[in-house]
Amino acid sequence: MSGKPDSSTQPLDWAQFPQWGARAAQWAGEYHAGLRDQPVRPPLNPGATLAALPEAPPEQAESTEAIFRDFKDIIMPGMTHWQHPRFFAYFPSNAAPIAVLAEYLASSVAAQCMLWQTSPAATELETRVLDWLRQAVGLPKGFSGVIQDTASSATLAAVLTMRERALNWAGNQHGLSDAGRLRIYVADEVHSSVDAAVWIAGIGHENMVRIPVSGPRRAMDVEALEQAIALDRAEGFIPTGVIASVGATSVGSTDHIAAVLAVARAHDLYSHVDAAWAGAAMICPEFRDLWDGIEQADSIVLNPHKWLGTPFDCSAHFLADPDSLVKTLATQPEYLKTHGADGVINYSEWSIPLGRRFRALKLWFLLRGHGLEGLRRMIRDHVRWAGQVEAALAALPQLEIVTPCMLSLFSFRVRPEGMAGADLDAFNLALLEAINADGRIYLTQTRIDDKLVIRFQAGPFSMTEADAETAVTVIAKMAATALEQVRGG
Ligand SMILES: *Cc1c(COP(=O)(O)O)cnc(C)c1O
């Protein structure tokens, strides 16, 4: 085959596909090799990409060559680079090359993995790799796993299960009009996907009872939880479920899982643990005290698509008793009778959407391609480097660490002498903008105890110790400049 791709306007067919596949792979390799020298976030104004795109769809086929060129020229200059080695914002969404390869294969096969018979090997691989992951994070035998598209979906599925269990499985049938007021208990710093799950489930946001957090872990106050449940019962509400967090998004708040789950058990409430980000770190035994007592949970979510290295989407949902979930979500209850018993699992009955992509393949490739030891090394490096950045920043003048490292996440702010309140928040927001405009690193902010703080998390798959040092250099320089400007008036 000649190296020159066809520039005709014949739609791409499978005969030409290998050539274009090779070009895409070539592009991907070069893209990643050059990332470190690119700004993490594009210096772009809103509307720039939209303006570069034709307003009407094409009537006639265009050449693959032209489409590919526009991908490079129009789209890529407007992308924030999530795989950049110095992406320290939000949480990571790592895509290990081996797992990207699996995604490519999965989309080539393009199977719909809703039922066992629509995807026998994909279904059985999902069963196997989730059991590998269960062992990897130290969950006991007896937990069954399923891959959901997102943690938001897993949490919604868990909230629906709590609701149905509390209503003796009648809510789906009769609706909630006569159901009484169900109550869900959460820590004050829970992820916003929990708020959404509670209102989508028809429980109502005002029935999401936020328990205050305290202590260095910013954990839910267990005594307050106990009291809230007792008070609600006395007032005729229906306590329904508890949602605990391990590594909440803002600054990594982590509940005392054993104590929270003991209360849930004592009151016969269904429990869900959101470990979407931090759950990946549980492959390292030394971090497992963060979720001590987890074996008492009814439902747990952790996202291999965050820190671990499977490209989005791959959210692992573990269940002590999948029957409750299936009873809640199955649209064709006759499946219940054979569910799991004869080796046939229809995972669509475990999820809200019917259709399912072949997501197990990338997790399988990842776990085999890196081994647990390789993945543990990455996570340990990130935790260590985040600690080094925290220590280096703590030594800077007028910089205060607001929340210390929880695994690889901490928060800080810079405080010019005599500045407080809204001025101080605005100062730090401007500092953050200056840091991000520099382009070498990318950070985000959050609010904690009514203070605006800057978050730092170490998590990119391709990060090295030098990238941690660059983060310190950039933050120190920008902070010094901002302080000077204040002093200069
Ligand atoms: C990221 C995150 C979520 C949401 O995850 P999705 O998979 O994007 O829905 C929920 N909870 C926590 C703690 C998170 O960090």
Image (cartoon, helix red, strand yellow):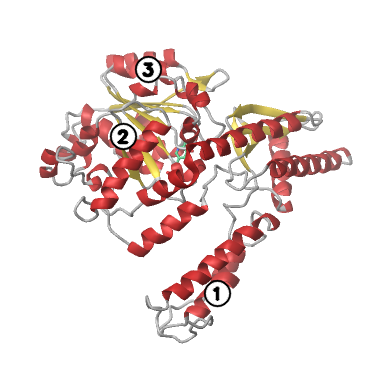
Position of 52 with respect to 294 (left or right) is right
Mark 1 or 3, nearer chain start = 1
Front disc: 1 or 2: 1
**Residue 488, horizontal then vertical, whole percent:** 89, 41
Check the picture and name the quadrant holding the C terminus: top right
Q: Amino acid at mark 3?
A: Ala
Mark 3 element type: helix
Please name the residue that numbered disc 1 is placed on: 70
Mark 1 or 2, nearer chain start = 1
**Residue 458 versus residue 102 in the image, above or below:** above
Front disc: 3 or 2: 2
Please name the residue that numbered disc 3 is placed on: 228
Give the camera-side residue of 292 and 454: 292
Q: CA distance from mark 1 to mark 3?
A: 57 Å
On residue 159, which mark appears? 2
Taking the spot 63% from the left edge, 37% from the top edge, the residue there is: 455
Taking the spot 20% from the left edge, 31% from the top edge, the residue there is: 179
Mark 1 element type: helix
